Image (spheres, grey):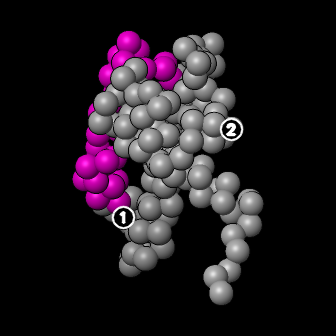
Amino acid sequence: MAARISHADRSELTRRALLHAAQELFATQGYAATSAVAIARRAKRSQGALQYHFPDKVALFQAVYEEENLAFSHFIVARIQDAEGDLWQREVVTACQAFVERAADPRVRRFSIWMAQPYSAGPPCNRRGRVWSSSARRWSR
């Protein structure tokens, strides 16, 4: 008999699927060209599930951006912990190597290139990468 998945676990799986689908579509199609319908379809989830987890497109974009930063941080920390040598050397050399290795990932590279585009291509970000909520577009538009 298969173990039952709790509501919280199902909800988290749905959220992760939506984030992954949005990241792929933002990276390949751009922010403006990516619709809620396309994201839900790619994630194999309903539009209602998308709206439940993310009130608007900007909130979803911000979550994707934060996930990418978190994944990058974990990647670098893991590399530093596995490296040999004295602490300073290990941190500097390994962080640089990890940065290059992570940047070689085509998904990350596409997303980074898209992030470097001017404002017209998507939501504005301040220097800390936080999306300004004043530019939010509701899903219904």
Q: Is residue 52 visible?
A: yes
Verify whether residue 14 appears in magenta. no
- In the current view of this chain or complex, which residue is farthest to the front? 1
Q: Is residue 133 left or right of residue 23?
A: right
Q: Amino acid at mark 1?
A: Thr
Which residues make up the magenta segment? Answer: 98-125
| Depth check, front residue: 1 or 65 | 1
Q: Mark 2 Cα within 10 Å, few/some/many (few <14, many 20+)?
A: few
Occupied quadrant, residue 91: bottom left
Above or below: residue 59 compared with residue 64: above
Residue 84 at x, y percent in the picture: 38, 78
Q: Looking at the image, is mark 2 or mark 1 earlier in the sequence?
A: 2
Asked whether disc 2 touches disc 1, contact meaning CB atoms under 8 Å apart, the reply is: no
Q: Is residue 115 visible?
A: no
Q: Amino acid at mark 2?
A: Tyr
Q: Majority secondary structure of the magenta segment?
A: helix
Residue at point 36%, 64% (across, down) = 94
Above or below: residue 3 compared with residue 6: below
| Depth check, front residue: 30 or 40 | 40
Query: Which residue is denoted by mark 1 in the rendering?
Result: 94
Query: Which residue is denoted by mark 2 in the rendering?
Result: 52
